[in-house]
Amino acid sequence: MTTSLPRQDRIRRALELLRNDTTDKFDEVIAFEPDEFTDPVLATEEREYVFGAVPSIVAHGSELAKANDFMTVQMPRNNIIVVRQKDGSVKAFVNLCRHRGAMLEDREKGRCRIFSCAYHRWSYDPDGSLRTITRDNTFGEVDRKEHGLIELPCEERHGFIWVVDNAKASIDVAAWLGPEMDEILAGYDLDKLVCYRAGGFDEPTNWKIMQDAFLDGYHIQYAHPNTAGKIIHTNVMAFEDFGRHCRFIAPRKSIDRFLEEDPGDTPLDKYVTETHFLLPNSTLLRQPDHFQLLTFRPHPTDPTKSRMEQRLMVPSVEDSPWDAEHWERRWNKNWEILLAVLHNEDFPLLRDSQRGMGSADAGDMMLGRNEIANQVFRREIKNLVATGRAGDQ
């Protein structure tokens, strides 16, 4: 575990690592087997013992701005509806009619005063209670209180909506984050930002291969020579390990002006990107003027597929120095850059990596000491799976 330093001190430590052509490092090189990305038994355990046990982010709160706003999400264990309540809270339900199992809602998002099943027109209120049994005089006796929608643990904290993908579980996001990361996120006022845009993509790649790529500062120069490689230094991380979660600073090349001179009291915020890994499946990037969130979920049945979602959280028009047109143009440009880097550069490499992992004689692989965030990710996922296995014995 690491005691957090003030931001300017952490940035200066990253600058010192850059001067010395090194990075913070893990204790040792770790071997792993490629079947960690193909094994259906392990994939089932991850769905149960990871996503069915701990909170993960499904949205930014601004995506459900008003009462009765909803979105649908394919989680690893359940199809769900997440809906804003009249009192401002958020609830999550299994997206399934309790009568004959028809899906209630097939839209990605919308606003709805009732959820109505297209099969027999049973309906439910946004709080999940069973509202209507059509032709109930012929159906028979039903305890409506016992046949509302199945609710999943859901909590809104630090501007994000978190869900545990298991109706039998409970949720406590603050406890899950731990005091260090909970305090870090609280200091960002993410609830005051708006989600400018969100997009989701289904990829033929295991979710851990996807997540690994966005914790990796070792590939930037090689996989992104004409984009991120021109902006961010490769293989330099000032790292903090908080146990389940971690944070690291990567210096931008604009900081090079201070390689030969002391920056003194000059704030260095604009010269770095700061990455937060939030176990189990989220990378939160703090850019100089906005945040990006990348999340990765396993496919419900296939270990070689996953769902990746990206979000851009920015100050509202009212809280920015620009008019609406400039605001729209600026963030649309940022979105298009992020989209291009991911889809044109990262995703093709990761798809090929998944294909390669399926080779019968792939041999063992390794994570280097310099791949420290990847080491923490793997360590903590293995811990969750091991804990789940022990609990089932």
Image (cartoon, rainbow, N blue to C red):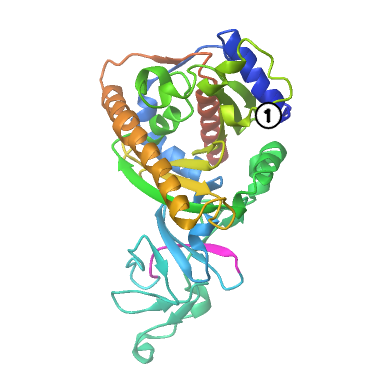
Query: In this orientation, which residue lies closer to the viewer: 238 or 376?
Result: 238
Left or right of 68, for residue 241: right
Residue 249 position in % (x across, y down): 59, 26
Residue 19 position in % (x across, y down): 60, 10
Left or right of 342, for residue 129: right
Which range is magenta? 88-97
Residue 253 position in % (x across, y down): 51, 20
Give the quadrant of the N terminus.
Answer: top right
Q: Is residue 172 magenta?
A: no
x 40%, y 40%: residue: 44
Residue 271 position in % (x across, y down): 57, 27
Identity of the amino acid at label 1?
Pro
User: Quarter-wise, where is residue 268 in the image?
Assistant: top right
Q: Is residue 126 visible?
A: yes
Pointer 1 local density, CA inside 10 Å: few below 14, some 14–19, many at least 20: few
Which residue has dot 1 on it? 267
Vertical order, 66 against 16 (above or below): below
Secondary element at image label 1:
loop
Query: In this orientation, which residue lies closer to the viewer: 35 or 163?
Result: 163
Q: Is residue 26 visible?
A: no
x 36%, y 33%: residue: 341
